[in-house]
Image (cartoon, grey):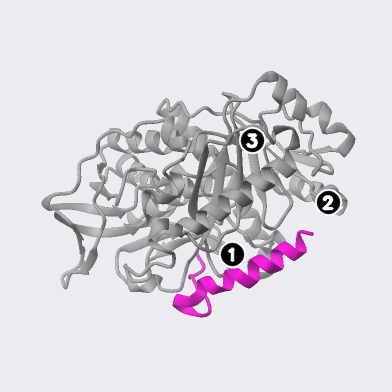
Amino acid sequence: MKRLYEAGAYSDASVQESYWRTTATSAPYPPAQGETGCDFAIVGAGYTGLSAALHLARDHGADVTVLEAEEPGWGASGRNGGFACLGGAKASDAALARRFGAQDLALFHAAQTGAIDSVAEILDRYGIDADRHSEGETILAHRPRDMRALRAEAPHVQASYGVTPRLIPREELADRGMAGPAFHGGMTVPIGFALNPMKYAQGLARAAVTEGARIHARSPVTGIERQAGGGYVLNTPRGRLRARKLLLATNGYSSDDLPPWLSGRYLPLQSSVLVTRELTGAELRDQGWTTDQMAYDTRNLLHYFRLMPNRRFLFGMRGGVRSSPAALEWMKTEIRRDFERMFPAWAHVETPHFWAGLVCMARDLAPYVGPLGDWPDAFTALAYHGNGVAMATYSGALMADLAAGRAPGRAFPALMRAPLRRFPLGPLRRALLHPAYYWYALRDL
């Protein structure tokens, strides 16, 4: 397989110290063995693939098999910060409106809120206990001018999503339990919630199985063969699966040759997370951070963080262009440095959990759901730009409708249907990250 990062990014090396792994135990899903068949084969058991399996089996009565290289939730779906929130595109609303029009942008706003609702519906319907908390999310200004920008943005948020954002002046942050020397005010958007992403992924897998889907873990797809009479054969180390239709749900863990159409059309980005030990009440008061709001700052290379129900603190950040052991150690040092700078009263607090994962970017900075190139009866959904908890769930449901030959019964804007364009430099496109990160770092000063 032709992948962009070093082998460590696709092995347990980058996730061994994940906190989420200590909170949930995966059900036993057997590997694929022998010659088997189904109507719909799904590659990847993250939110996208599991949501597609659930909706195909439940809403369309389909015969579905999911093939997963590791375990459900092993990739980004079990490594992220657990923000079920607005997002999915990196392009600004203004840029999307210029390209697709105001009506399509409004449809994308509906898709974002619908995505959050879809996660809530699954949690409630299947009784998934995923430690849900937080009333929306708070954006914290890391410079005075960013607070002015948030004030200017508030009317747009209200018009776009039908909610009234709460602006928080810097002098009121401490009263709201959001104190920190790096914050110059904030804005809370009351849409979305936080959760344990691994518990959600594993609950989603159980829900799909309950509805009749089959999941095979430890079954990496090593080859996909198109059949002359239609359909596909998917090869795994111990099995061959024949299917009428194919759904690819590998997102940032995709490869450039499986299938070849993906080559150059996606760009994985690293995101890293650390989690503290449980904090005492005195430690929380000393820092002045006592809220359970999920939050992020206004940097381009943003930080995202939240106090979890058990009083552990999660802190994540973008950056990092390599996944070697030395590079991961460097990133661990960097994220710890930023954590101490932003929350200085916790400089003595241990952070026993650190891990990294791959999110996915598209050249046009918007998610994609649609045909897998010119392959008949083949579909894919990917590129959520670091906000995949809700949008991947939603996109999987959209992909299920497309694969079943039904018109989606939910908002499906043109900007999510626009064909994926290739990045410049092809297999060397990761080199674009070096100047991009340098430029973003300068803009964040």
Q: Element under label 3?
A: strand
Magenta includes 426?
yes
- What predominant SS class does the magenta segment belong to? helix
Mark 2 nearby-residue class (10 Å; few <14, some 14–19, many ≥20): some
Q: Nearer the viewer, mark 3 or mark 1?
A: 3
Are the residues flagged by discs 2 and 3 in contact, CB closer than 8 Å? no
Residue at the right extreme, as displayed: 171
Identity of the residue drawn at 20% across and 46% down = 31
Label placed on residue 365: 1
Identify residue for label 2: 143
Total numbered labels placed on residues in the image = 3
User: Is 406 or 324 nearer to us in this picture?
Assistant: 324
Q: Element under label 2?
A: loop
What amino acid is at disc 3?
Answer: Arg
Cα distance, mark 1 to mark 2?
25 Å
What amino acid is at disc 1?
Answer: Leu
Mark 1 nearby-residue class (10 Å; few <14, some 14–19, many ≥20): many
Q: Of the residues under marks 1 and 2, which one precedes in the sequence?
A: 2
Residue 173 drawn at (x, y percent): 82, 33
Cα distance, mark 3 to mark 1?
26 Å
Q: Element under label 1?
A: loop
